Amino acid sequence: QALTGLFTEKPQSGEVTVGENITFVAKVNAESLLKKPTIKWFKGKWMDLASKSGKHLQLKETYDRNTKVYTFEMHIIAAKANFAGAYRCEVSSRDKFDSCNFDLTVHGECAYSNTLILFLSPSLCAVWLVLTSSSGWFVYVRVVQVNTEPDMDVWEILRHAPASEYEKIAFQYGITDLRGMLKRLKKMKKDEKKSEAFLKKLDPAYQVTKGHKIKLAVEVANPDVEVKWLKNGKEIQPSGRYIFENVGNMRYLTINHCSLADDAAYCCVVGEEKCTTELFVKEPPVLIVKNLEDQMVMKGERVELECEVSDEGASVKWEKDGVELTRDESFKYRFKKDGCKHVLIINEATKDDCGHYKVKTNGGESMAEVLVQEKELEVYQSIADLTVKAKDQAVFKCEVSDESVRGTWYKNGVEVKPDARINITHIGRIHKLTIDDVKPEDEGDYTFVPDGHAFNLSAKLNFLEVKIDYVPRQDPPKIHLDCMGNTAESTIVVVAGNKLRLDVPITGDPAPTVIWTKADKVITEGDSRVHVETTKGHCIFTIEGAERQDEGIYSVVVRNPAGEDTADISVKVVDVPDPPQTPRILSVGEDSCVVQWDPPLFNGGQPIIGYVLERKKKKSYRWMRLNFDPYPETTYEAKRMIEGMDYEIRVYAVNSIGMSRHSPASQPFVPVAPTSEPVGLCVDDINDTSISLKWRPPERIGSAELEGYGVEYCKEGTEEWIPAIQGLTDRTSLIIRGLTTGDKLQFRVRAYNMAGPSAPATLAQPITIREIMQRPKIWLPRNLRQTLIKKVGDTVNLVIPFQGKPRPKVTWSKDGDPLNPAFASVRNSEVDTILFIRKTDRKHSGKYDLQVQIENVEDTASVNLQIVDLPGPPEALKIADIWGFNVALVWKPPKDNGNCEITGYTVQKADKKTMEWYTVYDQFRRTNCVVSDLIMGNEYIFRVFANNLVGLSPEPCNAKDSAYIQKTGGLPTYKEADFSHAPKFTHPLVNRSIIAGYNATLSCAVSGIPKPKVTWYKNKIDITNEAKYRMLSKQGVLTLEIRKPCPFDGGVYMCKAVNNCGEDSVECKLEKPQS
């Protein structure tokens, strides 16, 4: 199969015989993965094999840190027939997914006929019927006279005959080796089971992605035949989705726009034959097209988090701070789906709803932060001090941000109750307290307290008492003000945009004229914002919507014939400050950044109280507030950001008047943390002028790409770190050259990414630059510690590593003599030596000694090499005796054993009539044997091959004489053998201890004819009927299984076997389970 997706090696289809083991292997390269891959094994479509692990199935996994490859193995132990079928392996890692299909075929145990027929001649034959039973072998012999028939094609007759007719055909045609013919006939019939209708069938399984098309193809033998296509047993009719094609012998079924409904079993039918397959429809990963947006809401408001996915039918999972969300009893969370849009709705948000919300699909995820702010009541207009005269009306008025907020009015701490003169109103955001016909007792401090909020608004009501005195008719004008001058206490402050109203009490008779000036310029009503009004006892100057340029000193002059009076009034216009300067990002962390900005150019006439910051994701339009209370400094650390996401930050300035417009947004930045420090920094090698360092990558790298490593060193006693190389290295090792011999240096390594350097990894102590003598040591590989056996003509390449400094002297010798370069090649390096023989001969066998030496110190090792070849033929094969149907053979071992032990002999016989050789014994260990079951009247010759671990001898040893099996007047009679014997335990029980909670088994083996009756005892008490124990018996192996033993189960267990010939028993001690 082609390697695509995550697999570097896919499991392949396999075959196994019942009772044998098989292993399927899958490999995944994790070098490009951020997370350990997850693997699942399935049988059929949906059966997850993880839950089936046990005696017959084991799942294992290993990880190679050097190659970064995960190896997953599925071991099937003692396969059964029902294990056959289609299997699937799936691997996934975050947003990556891959799968593959494979098949397991389980063959039954080889079943051989229990009938063996041997013929003596065309006219006379002996039929041997051999039956196997538990009691032994039983042999029956009979003789039948038959007539000679002309030569026929016996193969054709046997191929078309039923099994019950084989014996009759053998008698009729004088077959001499029916056993061999039946074996070949079985193989011929197996080959004939090929389909007559199909030249090429459907594959066992197909896989297609949802929405794609797939073409199923079969090749039929007859180009004109009609085929039927079935889906789950029902015939498929041609349509726009199902297209049938006939091209020569090929028949195609094309399925367009595959859906999950097409995941089914498909069958192609031709006449009475059919072939089937399974189609697996794989859903493509669902991608998140539109991400979630961060939100900040007020307490009690409704929150809607919306995302958009790539598939309308997809399902998503919502999480809050890593915990999956469900519809709870209070219906706090509601999940809404509209086509590709998915919405999470939170009714009446509370502080508990703050956090990170995540939506997940099988192809990705998106996260957003929700902040819930307590509602903060803002005062749009506060109540102001009033000075009123008797009989006038006093109106206290304030405006707050929330229309639903109610409040209470107090006078000198006592709640004000409405009556005929006092009226309290609440219309929208405006609260009013109106006092008609003001009296002296109404003077005092008035306070408005909003319900549910910890603050109040206060103002003072001053009563102006008018005294009527007799004055002459000529009264010079007089201005009655207590805020004249240019001091801070007498300055009138007005907020920009509000109305400036200067109400100046004046007296004079006759009524004086009033002139207002600013900077020696008379103010008239030419400007629509300015109004000047003179009434009896008052002159009123009003500016609608005060602006910054309206600030200054205003002069009022009153004149009448009796004189004039002048007063100066200082007015200060205050406003919100200008926006701060563009913020600058000083540094970033894993989920934070440090931002700095400059104060605004104009503070609005009031000191800057602090600053408010907001952030947003670069691709979003929603700004999130970072602080709710003004922050007094101009450097701020913003936290709770997502690593790897682009952000922008802006700043507001706040003074006592309000909040400025926002500053320009900062340059986009990405929160990312430096990596952790490199791991395992150590010295790999050192000499007089250089040092070699090595280390491992950091355990945590983060979302930013690792740019490289910086290596520095510092002389002991100084603090100056000197770069070992210019720039960075992307390797995890480095050789630093050009160092001074004898210097003591400290070394450190730092990993760099876009966030800067990591914490340094340093050596435990300074290193002295000087070559260190290292004793010579040979590291002999494990496979060379025993005799290495090679065949003649093989190549020998021995690589033996060693150590030692300075470079040691390497010497090879063979059998005590120096090694001749023409005999074998030797190549040496600083760390290993190689012995190479291109083409071995038997003369290369022997003991090879290796010596590495530095001055007077040395180390040695030996390697034994044995070159083996095929043995020579055995010698002196002769016929020692002939009796009945038996021949005794003896021979001598070969002179040349091929330089290795003779493992056995192969003995063959041949009938002189046919000269076809048949093996009687294979891997026979002795040098004599008896060949039995020969046919009377036939003459036989014999030969013997020698066998060693290389193979059979090229030539056999042939017997000089032949053996003729004499005919006798009658058939010999045989006394039926009695094979019965008393039970005997061939494998005893073994003392053991067990662990509580785990099943334990006791096993032994017994033989006996007839089959003995087995009884188990514990402490001499029969436990046959105890439910806690399970007794098993298979082919003489007896097993007692104790289910989850407890301390009570300790004791002496005995197994007793009894039959008619006697009895036997074994026992063992089972120690109490350990807790």
Image (tube, rainbow, N blue to C red):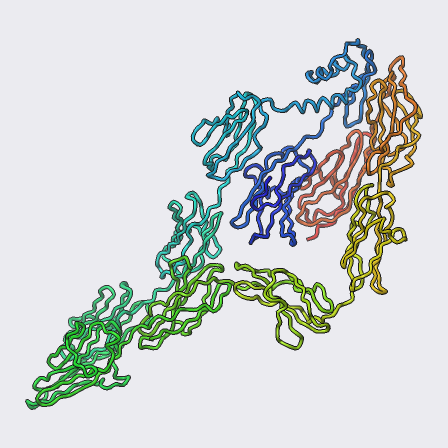
In the rendered image, residue 883, in percent from the top left (x then y), is placed at: 91, 21
Image coordinates of residue 383 in percent, x first then y, are 24, 73
In this view, the residue farthest toward the left is 473
Residue sitting nearer the eye, 551 or 121? 551
Q: Position of residue 471 (x, y in %)?
A: 8, 90
Q: Along the line of sight, which residue is nearer the eye, 297 or 515? A: 515
Query: Who is closer to the viewer here, 836 or 214?
Result: 836
Quarter holding the N terminus is top right
From the viewer's perspective, tell me whether residue 851 is left or right of residue 610. right
Q: Is residue 629 in view from this perspective? A: no
Residue at 17%, 73% (x, y): give it. Answer: 527
Can you say whether 527 is above or below 620 in the image? below
Question: Within the image, what quadrant is residue 386 found in?
Answer: bottom left
Q: Is residue 442 left or right of residue 713?
A: left
**Is 81 left, or right, of 788 in this rendering?**
left
x, y percent for residue 877: 91, 28
Which quadrant of the figure has residue 377? bottom left
Query: What residue is rendered at 35% in x and 58% in y?
Result: 301
Question: Is residue 430 visible from the viewing direction of this image?
Answer: yes
Outermost residue to the front: 822
